[in-house]
Image (spheres, rainbow, N blue to C red):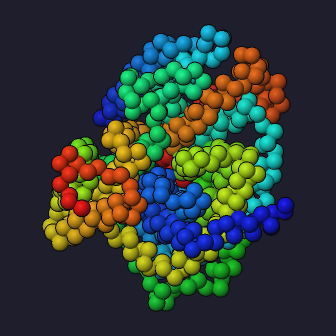
Amino acid sequence: MDIFEQLLGGLQAIITPTNLLLLMAGVTVGMVVGIMPGLGPSAGIAILLPLTFSLEPTGAIVMLAAIYYGAMYGGTITSILINTPGESATVASTFDGYPLARQGRAGAALVLCAVASFVAGTVGAVLISGLAPVFSRAARSFGPPEFFMVVMLGLLMLVVIIGGNRLYGLISALIGFALATVGVDIGTGVQRYTFGSAELVGGIDFIPIAIGLFGIGEILYSVYLNQHSVDFPYIKVSSKDEGFWPSRREWRESTGPTARGSVLGFLVGTLPGAGATIASLMSYSMEKSISKTPEKFGKGAIPGLIGPEAANNAASAGSLVPLLTLGIPGSGATAVLLGAFLLYGLRPGPLLMTQNPEFAWGLIASMYLGNVVLVLLNIFAIPLFASFMKIPLRIAIPVIVVLCTIGTYTVNGSIIETWLMVAAGGLGFFMKRFGFSPAAAIVALVLGPIAEETLRQSLLISSGSPLIFYQRPVAFGMAILIAVLVAVPVAYRLIRGRSLPTVATGDSDE
Amino acid sequence: MTALRTAKGLFLLTTLIGSALYTAVAFDLPWTTTAGRIGAGFFPRIIGLALVVSSGWALFNELAGRSPDVQQAQEQASADEPTQVRDTLVVVALIVAFVPALYYLGALIGMVLFTLVTLFIFNRGRVLTNVAVGVGFPVVLFLLFDRGLNATLPPGVFDLVPF
């Protein structure tokens, strides 16, 4: 069955009034989540996940995925209008976006970004349509040793690439693994870390931890930084303004960066552990290095805004490739998405596209539709969405806390899980405060059981010998890559006497 | 900056103590089963030992004043930002009070109380807005979850809401 037929099949599966409504609700909510500084797609998906429990799995996942890429569009608005990125993936949009807004070109900047995001999102959807089946077929030969290595590689990349301190990233991941061991050990039936509590026998659900780390933790950190006392002075934008629409020159200037950013962003997004933040920053560097007028960057250069914008949207499509075909999330947001898949009884991995093709292709098809809805919303409703920024954080605090708490409670009707969420919120605050990585913790929490299961199976196959990881070529190749990822920063430090640069934008939220 | 380092040191020390306790429990779990396969304690011991080593190393670096360049730049930037410890503690106290309020008073009353109190503390002077949001939002959310989604909400010990 060729790709086009499968895509049509996926489209048929999701073109129902309910699913279309959920898609539109998802992209709208995603935009709003993206607009609110501090709340990113991870928090948005985690907080709104409990709302989707009564929905059909396909509709629920379509909505959650729509929140994910909708947030990428929304984060750009705050970057341009108030020089505050909505999430880490839109940091690069502040470099030239805000200066453009100060020059009276806010409307033009937002319209150009909307179109670039649409093109990049569509390119990403096309590429995922082509690559996902290829990855899936390649991964069908993977056994437990390969999957264990993929899990380790993905987590290590997240720890090594993102964050100011790799040691703290490693500690964060280990905390996630430790939380994942609570409950009954599947292999032996022995209870671990339950301390006689019936509530903990089933393990620690990732939802309260995700909501606590990303939702409550973020709120506490924003209050700590005094953002609740500040009314952001923002630049008003209206479609009636003279400079709202881009000029011909600006359209021409944006075509190259859009194309380059789309391809670069998608490729970077497919790497487990990399994501939209890295993609957007790489695109900015690339555009500046190939520009004939690099001195204009940082002062309102169109390529400096459009390249990263295209890259971050294409990367969010790219990051779905390892998620769907290998079951490996590369970020906090995709880890929460993976958790949602598992909750609905869907096991992402090589068999997803053959066992649940209507779901997999439906999700990909929904990305095409979602991009169309987003570009229309972005162009014609920019002033409406921009007005959300007038809502001060001090009003949003109780709203977000109540949503988090009630959402957590409704998952299993458990007050213990609600307290776990509060504790995770405290942990999330301290993690952000001191440079740890909540994203690495949640990825490890979701992948921990998979890692343990595949390790157990691998050692069962090899009768306890760890040499199995060296005897199988793909697993051995990944082991080499892991060794390189560990050795390079150490060698760099020894040779240069300082640390290898990282994407130190705080925790990657996308 | 010193206060930050002290706070971070305490956090790392707490992590180290927690890791040690985790590892101690892990060593009470069997390493292998009677059939010689991986036991329940296999993974936890590896994680626990790695946590003890890494958090111990991080604590040592912190006490010795050795941080990567990027970390030092971030800490300097953090030290320059205005911070609101008091307000953060107030929000924490409100959240901690909200959970038992939910349990004992029920979802609707708990949400209304929490939202109103938080707004009147942080959004002073705007009575109309605070009342509108403080009552309106919880009611909408209650109806959404209870009626729209048929979700389980805490009824409260006294089940004060008749509908």
B152 vs A292: above or below: above
Left or right: residue A87 versus residue B7 is right
> The N terminus of chain A lies in which quarter of the figure?
bottom right
Q: Position of residue A355 (x, y in %)?
A: 73, 50
For the point 57% across and 56% down, the residue is: A57
Q: Residue at x 56, y 85 (%)?
A: A245
Q: Is residue A503 visible?
A: no
Q: How many marks?
A: 0
Where residue A460 sits: x, y (%)? Answer: 72, 21
Choose top left, top right, bottom left or bottom right for residue B79.
Answer: top left
**Residue A396 to residue A354: above or below:** below
Q: Which one is nearer the viewer's eye here, B160 or A158?
A: B160
Judge by depth and name the residue closer to the eye, A307 or A199: A199
Nearest the camera: A288 or A101? Answer: A101
Image side of residue A213 versus residue A223, left or right: right
Residue at horizontal 42%, vertical 31%?
Answer: A200
B110 with respect to A417 (left or right) = left
Q: Is residue B109 placed above or below B89 in the rendered structure? A: below
Residue sitting at x 32%, y 52%? B153
Where residue A99 sits in the image (x, y, percent)?
A: 49, 70
- Asked whether the viewer can see residue A190, the reply is yes
Q: Position of residue A387 (x, y in %)?
A: 38, 75
Quarter of the rendering containing residue A483: top right
